[in-house]
Every structure is written in structure tokens, then in C-alpha cells.
Amino acid sequence: MKNKNSESSKNAGPEVTKTENKVNLLEIADSETAEPSLEVIRLGHDEVALIPFTAESVSVDVHFCPEPEINSYVLCNGPDCVLCKIGRKQDQRLLLPVYQPTAGCVGILPVSRSFRPFALLPQILNILKNGKAMVMFVIRDGAKYSVSTAELKDDEDAGETVTKKFVEEYNSGLHNLASVYPTIENAQLARIGEIRRMLTLKGFS
């Protein structure tokens, strides 16, 4: 007499094994290293030491979103931008790479185009026009920027190695300065309560 269990197991065919989604942690680390992230420099009441090494910047349009889901500046989405449609103020920022001597790395300094008294841009321009290796110490109090400077001595680290590497990587397309601000698609913005209600009040479906 044949064993029914053995027959049914034969008819069932080969056993299917579950495929595992294997991830090599070292490969993740390598991919993260290959795409270095840039950080925006935030100024406040504490002095921040910065060394300008280039006059080349990238201009971006941004909106500030106070909604708890965002609470930061985001990149403008262009002609069909939801934030523009609801009348959210658009600001232009010049993204300037600068060397941070205390951290030993390059950061991105957002600079307004304003030339009003105590604005940051004209003070940076004076340093760049000087032509000497200078460290600037910056304090922000609202819209007022206080900048003092000191000339770097020959034996002081001006970050030449770090900045040279950054420039080479930037010229090769490795860095996207605008990435310091998040990009949020219009559809996602329109799902946020306050923005969605404002769109409705202004007649946008």
C-alpha cells in the first residue's frame, strides 16, 4: 500500500524557499560615502567662524513653511508652485560654499541679495575683494549681521586641502548646493491642512 502522504508531497513539486532581501552594511556605507551630503550653516547669537574661498554661488528661490509638518525653508516648485499660488512669500538665496575651520569641512551659507545696512552680502563682498586669506566671525540678530575679521597667518589652516577637494568634486557634478533645502512636491504640499484650506479659499481645486 502506497503512503498517501509521500504521494502528495511528490505531487506538490519542489519545495519553494523564501527569498531573503539581503543587505550588506559595508556596501551601504560605501554608497553613502560616495554621495557626500552638504549642510546649511545656521547663524545666530553665537559667533560662527567661516573662511570664504570662492565668489561662486548658486541662486535658489525658497519659501518658509511654518507648518509643523515642515517648519523650514523649502525650494520653490516653479511656475505651478502651490506655495506661490497661496501667496506664500518667495525669497531668493545665494548659496555660498565656505570653509568651517572649527569643523574642518565645507558648509553652505545662505545669503540674501539685500544690500541694506548690516546685511550679510556686502560684508562678505568686502572680504572677497580684499584678496587675502581671512576668517570672518559672524553673529546674527534678526536681520542684522555683525561681521568681524582676522587675517590668517601663514601657519594657520585655511582649509586649502579640503576646499580644493570640494571644488574638484563640485566641478565634476558630485555636489548639488540646492540639496541643502528640501524639495516637496506640490501634491504633497496640498495635503497639508493649512495649505489645503488656503488653496480651497483661493479657488484652487
Image: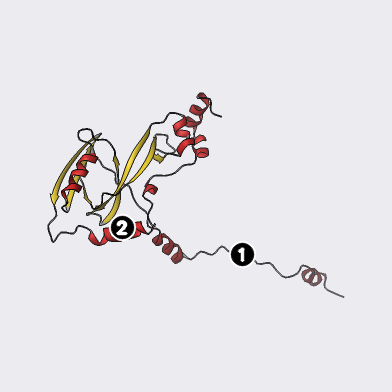
Image quadrant for the C terminus?
Answer: top right
- The residue closer to the viewer here, 27 or 15, is 27
Q: Position of residue 14 (x, y in %)?
A: 72, 70
Q: Give the Cα distance between marks 1 and 2.
A: 44 Å
Number of the label disc, if any, that sits on residue 19: 1
- The residue closer to the viewer here, 85 or 187, is 85
Color scheme of the displayed model? secondary structure
Q: Position of residue 95 (x, y in %)?
A: 32, 45
User: Label 2: which residue?
Assistant: 167
Identify the amino acid type marked 2: Val
Number of the label disc, if any, that sits on residue 28: none
Residue at 75% from the left image edge and 69% from the top image edge? 13
Residue at 54% from the left image edge and 65% from the top image edge? 22
Secondary structure of the residue carrying tag 1 is loop
Identify the amino acid type marked 1: Thr
Q: Which residue sits furthest bottom?
A: 1
- The residue closer to the viewer here, 168 or 195, is 168
Q: Position of residue 103 (x, y in %)?
A: 25, 55
Looking at the rendered image, the disc whose residue lies closer to the viewer, 1 or 2, is 2
Instruction: Indicate left or right for 142 with 28 as reference.
Output: left
In this picture, is 31 found above or below 185? below
Secondary structure of the residue carrying tag 2 is helix
